[in-house]
Image (cartoon, coloured by chain):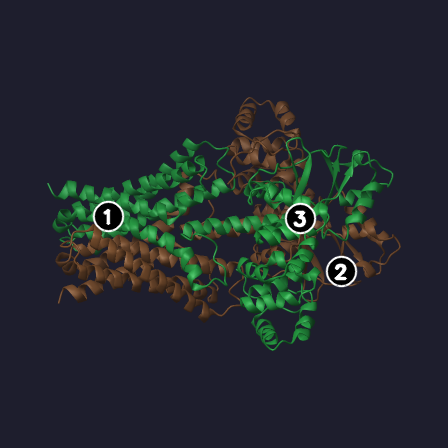
Chain colours: A green, B brown
Amino acid sequence: MANNKTDIVMKSGLQVDKELLENISHLLEIGADKSILNILRDLHPADIAEIINNLNLDNAEKLFSLLDTETASDVLPELDENQREFILKKIDKKTITDIVDELKTDDATDIVSELPENVAEHVLDNIDKEDSEDVKKLLKYPEDSAGGIMTSDFVFVHESGTVKDAIKEVRKHAEEFDQIYHIYVLTDDEKLVGIVQLKSLLTNPLHKRIKSIMEKDLIYVTPDIDQEEVANIMDKYDLVAIPVVDKNRVMLGRITIDDIIEVIQEEASEDLQKIAGLSEEQESSDSIFQISRIRLPWLLMVLILEIINGLLLSTFQATIQQQITATFFIPVIMAIGGSSGNQAAVVMVRSLALGEVLHSKTLKRLLKELGVALLNGIACAIIILLATQLVFSSNEVPLSFSLLLSGTLLIIISYATLFGASIPLILKRFGIDPAVAASPLVSTANDIFGLLIYFSLVTLFYTA
Amino acid sequence: MANNKTDIVMKSGLQVDKELLENISHLLEIGADKSILNILRDLHPADIAEIINNLNLDNAEKLFSLLDTETASDVLPELDENQREFILKKIDKKTITDIVDELKTDDATDIVSELPENVAEHVLDNIDKEDSEDVKKLLKYPEDSAGGIMTSDFVFVHESGTVKDAIKEVRKHAEEFDQIYHIYVLTDDEKLVGIVQLKSLLTNPLHKRIKSIMEKDLIYVTPDIDQEEVANIMDKYDLVAIPVVDKNRVMLGRITIDDIIEVIQEEASEDLQKIAGLSEEQESSDSIFQISRIRLPWLLMVLILEIINGLLLSTFQATIQQQITATFFIPVIMAIGGSSGNQAAVVMVRSLALGEVLHSKTLKRLLKELGVALLNGIACAIIILLATQLVFSSNEVPLSFSLLLSGTLLIIISYATLFGASIPLILKRFGIDPAVAASPLVSTANDIFGLLIYFSLVTLFYTA
């Protein structure tokens, strides 16, 4: 874990810390715009974004409005949702048009999709025409697909060209694109046929044909591919950019690694959220009501399911009355069923996310889970047998009850593990995010089945 | 989620699927080495690695031994731990020396650190001398620090040089390095003073001084920085490579984005593991016993804590006997306490991992958590009041008991939320990974305190 930031040197040595934030808030309150601009001039746009993300909404908007168009266009895509939403609501049509005009088409698409319809239309009518066409196309792809995260800005050269032509293209776009990694080689009808690394332009003579130096082994995706899949491919093949092509291999755009890192972070957060029972990502500037709205739905679902569990227990009232001891071990049954089910579910969810399970056999995998469950079940059964006999008095927990408890634990661990491992597979087959399987929903279901098994067995053996 | 791989085109159109795996296994069994090499020739090293990761250990070793040195050096760093460990045990000194000689120094360091001491010594004595020195230096850094993941291979030019000199350097290293993103500009005593993008070499005249075109705003890290922090910096500033320098700014190496993606994936997995109560990452080739060893420790801890919980409940035996109804709601108390605590813990763990909480005030944050808890607590309290009155018969659950249940739930949600949000902060202060707070450990602790509060209140009100 990160412990300090003192050894990271930023653009100017300035760091975004509490002091800087308080300083800027103060300067904003007293309207000392010049002093603020003096501070911001030395900062990286990502740092300015971090500052804005940590200000209250009014100050965030005030600070943003001080930025020149170019800086504003660098900062805007990096803002948290709350801040961005608020700023986009306040900003006038002309300013936002100028800012969007500076953006790469993928960022432009994200911003335009967040604008009110009439503002979006105004922006699309007034930015560079070609960009506007591109953005309109990009808007049509689902947000979490390759098409939804690609940019249509890329440097290309026709296959008939030379190294010199390619260098000319790089020069033409050098200002516009922050980072150029590859030149894409296209046929006359825009089909992708090769890739040239920038370093190859430096190591080959100017008159050399592009065709003779390009790499022909291409890894590309179509726009419908899920962003998580794109992330897995770029991770596997160590790519910094991947071309996106249509079914005829016509070049549509490219996805760069910085966007993929965001995808990976996002997907990891999403998995964690589901497992923790959060309905969406919580941001540091969210209000108490917003946070409540994120957490309450799952809490209520758990509550209702556990009330049903209570109803179920009430049907065993006679058993409980006869065998009070049984109630002492409700927590053991619930926690062990929940834990073993969750372990299996999380491992399976992770495997699916990384694309691992595709190649191994499902049945074999489930049998392995059963093996693990039996092994761990036996271990837990032995421990509870010993513990209850040693720790509780023998009239509180007789040997026969300890044995019953042991057996129940073995059954529940086996059942919960298989349940936890299967649900992600089933959800995936039905097109539902498997991570839901690791959520409180499943461990609550495990509680109900676990206690049902437990009290049925107790009833069977003790209330004849 | 990823649903199919049919639209991703690999090097040759060949895909690593069940059929290919079975085919290769078969060819390995009958010793048809030539046919195998024919298949492998068209595959990307990452695909060969994927195949090996999905073979049993003996076949994995057999396949690996068929690879030429260059391919082997591309494949080895991509292998899963089990496969790599087994292969490194079987491989002879000369072969592994040749392979390591081909590796970038960061990968070489990883491999050497996994070799038995005498083999490692032999390798270090026989590879390129300069590389050997570098690897020895790299071996000294902790595995999860910037030093532990950096490579000491980089392209640099002295500040007195020209664009022509820089291009010469690129040419010299073009073969050796897969990807060159930047040229680092160093002083005569090796201090980092600037960075030149490859595209700048294409857009500036050959005689131009490097000093006049380099970027002087540097973002770099020192080797002691935690790898997760490096990931956050590279993510924030959208970097594909970051230089690592010592305290005097002397250039030591660089970290590339592909290694950072692995870090991000690893850290996300680690967080998930802790939350699920897994002691380490589970690999698809792990045996039942290995998986058991990963899962059992947490399961046993939960078991023992919940047996203690059982002991605690047994002290309330008199209360339970008098008020059987109370036992029906043990699941509600446990699940709601656990869920609300977990929600708060996971959000806090994630905030800490992303470095968010550093700037906001801790007390303010905890007060916000309390606000959320009260809001959600009131909602849950109302629901359980209504539900128990409507669903259960009034002699089973009298109004007074429903009210008691309501109040208890409000207390428990408040307490568990604060508990869940505080523990990560406390753990971090003591240098322990905050993610432990989201593990079953804490929700089990919540069970114990929750039930203690619940049965104390029941005892107070119903057994006067």
Q: Real-space Cα distance between discs 3 and 2?
A: 26 Å
Q: Which of marks 1 and 3 is in front?
A: 3
Residue A218 horizontal/vertical position (percent): 68, 35
Who is closer to the viewer here, B49 or B356?
A: B356
Q: Real-space Cα distance between discs 1 and 2?
A: 69 Å
Who is closer to the viewer here, A273 or B133?
A: A273
Left or right relative to B403: residue A439: right
Residue A420 horizontal/vertical position (percent): 37, 42
Mark toward the start of the polypeptide (1 vs 3): 3
Tell me which amino acid carries mark 1. Leu
Query: Do the residues marked 3 and 2 share a common chain?
Result: no
Q: Name the residue under label 3.
A: A105
Q: Mark 1 points at which residue?
A: A385
Q: Residue at x 21, y 50 (%)?
A: B391
Tell me which amino acid carries mark 3. Thr
Q: Mark 2 points at which residue?
A: B215
Residue A89 horizontal/vertical position (percent): 57, 60
Tell me which chain the residue with mark 1 is part of. A
Marks 1 and 2 close (CB-CB < 8 Å):
no
Who is closer to the viewer here, B123 or A86?
A: A86
